[in-house]
Image (spheres, rainbow, N blue to C red):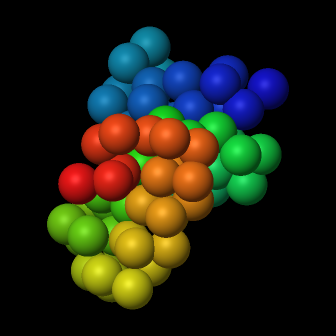
Amino acid sequence: LAICEEELAKCFENGIGIEHSNQKALHYYENSANHGYRLAQEHLGNAYLKGKLGLIKSPEKAIEYYQKAADQEDVNSMM
């Protein structure tokens, strides 16, 4: 389920086969991350760090998501 949510989020984020929506993309990334999917956690870390998906930049929130992904041995989140 978490992988499907993350894939759907990417479709909304990039407007692939569906109308672009940052709000819906964020919703599905958060669901996926809450289900423990490390790639969604990493993606949310990037979004908070860079202020993507309509989010206000928040290094603190970025670190939270990066830590969750790193705890699952996501190498990109460990950098």
Image location of residue 15, percent across then percent down: 35, 28
Residue at the image point whose x is 39% and y is 85% from the top: 60
**Where residue 20 appears, x then y in whole percent?**
38, 37
49, 66: nearer the viewer? 66
Q: Residue at x 71, y 46 (%)?
A: 36
Indicate left or right for 48 with 9 as reference: left
- Specify the quadrant that holds the N terminus: top right
Give me the residue at 30% from left, 82% from top.
59
Query: Where is 63 relative to 46, above or below?
Result: below
Q: Quadrant of the C terminus?
A: bottom left
Q: Nearer the viewer, residue 16 or 55?
A: 55
- How far across and how far down the image is residue 30, in percent? 62, 55
Q: Residue 61 vs residue 3: left or right?
A: left
Q: Quadrant of residue 28?
A: top right
Residue at the far top: name it. Answer: 17
Which quarter of the figure has residue 58?
Answer: bottom left
- Choose between 57 and 75: the one closer to the eye: 75
Is residue 24 rendered to the left or right of residue 34? left
Report x, y in % for residue 29: 56, 47
- Image vertical order of residue 18 relative to residue 69, above or below: above
Task: Please say whether residue 31 is visible from this viewpoint.
Answer: no
Q: Nearer the viewer, residue 68 or 25?
A: 68
| Residue at image point 57% right, 32% down | 6
In this orientation, does residue 71 appear? yes
Number of numbered discs overlaid on the protein picture? 0
